[in-house]
Image (spheres, grey):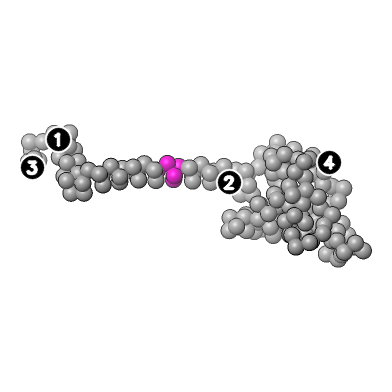
Amino acid sequence: MSIAAGDASLADLALAWRQRISEAIGIENLKRGIGITVAGGLLAGSVVAAGWYYANTASGGVASAEVVSQGRQIYSDQCAACHGADLEGQPDWRSPLASDRLPAPPHDASGHTWHHPDDVLFRIVKEGTAAIVGGGYESDMPGFADVLSDPEIRAVLTYIKSTWPERERRYQERVSEAN
């Protein structure tokens, strides 16, 4: 079908274009291409939504004052006895105790917490250090799966991260993204 430019309406041109594409690539390929395009759009939308969610709940997001406050309280109630009220950890935390276990490390910038990605930190709090390290490793750090909900664990980690200087926060964000 050939339509002269002066004789055609916009609708006629669109119909002619669709017919030419259908003839050139076949109607089944056109349907498949449209399906792939729609599926790709849905997938891209899901990726964007997931990225927004994790950016606002993990290390990269701006934590709400309410979440930080909740995390501070949970830290005080559940963590400070071993890790210190000011996140300072136990003295000589790099040297084994008589039990051959390491003292509780600091969670401030002087420690190594910020070297770990979010998922590892979450699992350590939830399952305990020995469960994560494996190989018979022994630790005094228990898992809190029976004590804290997942959102409470995230709140504690959000509070801890909120105390780090910018350099440590950026480093930890990059480690989390790479993981």
Q: Which residue is mark 4?
A: 77
What mark, if any, has residue 2 been given in the picture?
3
Q: Which amino acid is tagged 1?
A: Asp
Q: Amino acid at mark 2?
A: Ala
Q: Alpha carbon of mark 4 to alpha carbon of mark 3: how far?
A: 79 Å
Task: Check disc 4 and give the amino acid type.
Answer: Asp
Label 1 and label 2: CA atoms lie apart by 47 Å
- Do the residues under discs 3 and 1 have CB atoms within 8 angstroms? no
Marks 2 & 3, CB-CB < 8 Å contact: no
Vertical placement of residue 71 versus 82, above or below:
above
First reached walking from the N terminus: tag 2 or tag 3: 3
Q: Earlier in the sequence, mark 4 or mark 2?
A: 2
User: Which callout, 4 or 3, points at the residue further toward the start of the chain?
Assistant: 3
Camera-nearest residue between 94 and 159:
94
Which secondary structure dominates the residues rendered in magenta?
helix
Q: Which residue is mark 2?
A: 55
* Sequence-earlier tag: 1 or 2: 1
Along the viewing direction, whichever of 106 and 6 lies nearer the viewer: 106
Residue 80: image location, x then y, percent = 84, 47
Magenta span covers which residues? 41-45
Q: Which class describes the residues within 10 Å of circle 4: few (<14), some (14-19), or many (20+)?
A: few
Task: Please report whichever mark, 3 or 1, sits nearer to the chain's N-terminal start.
Answer: 3
Residue at image position (68%, 57%) is 116
Q: Residue at x 73, y 52 (%)?
A: 124
Locate residue 59 relative to residue 147 in the image: left or right: left
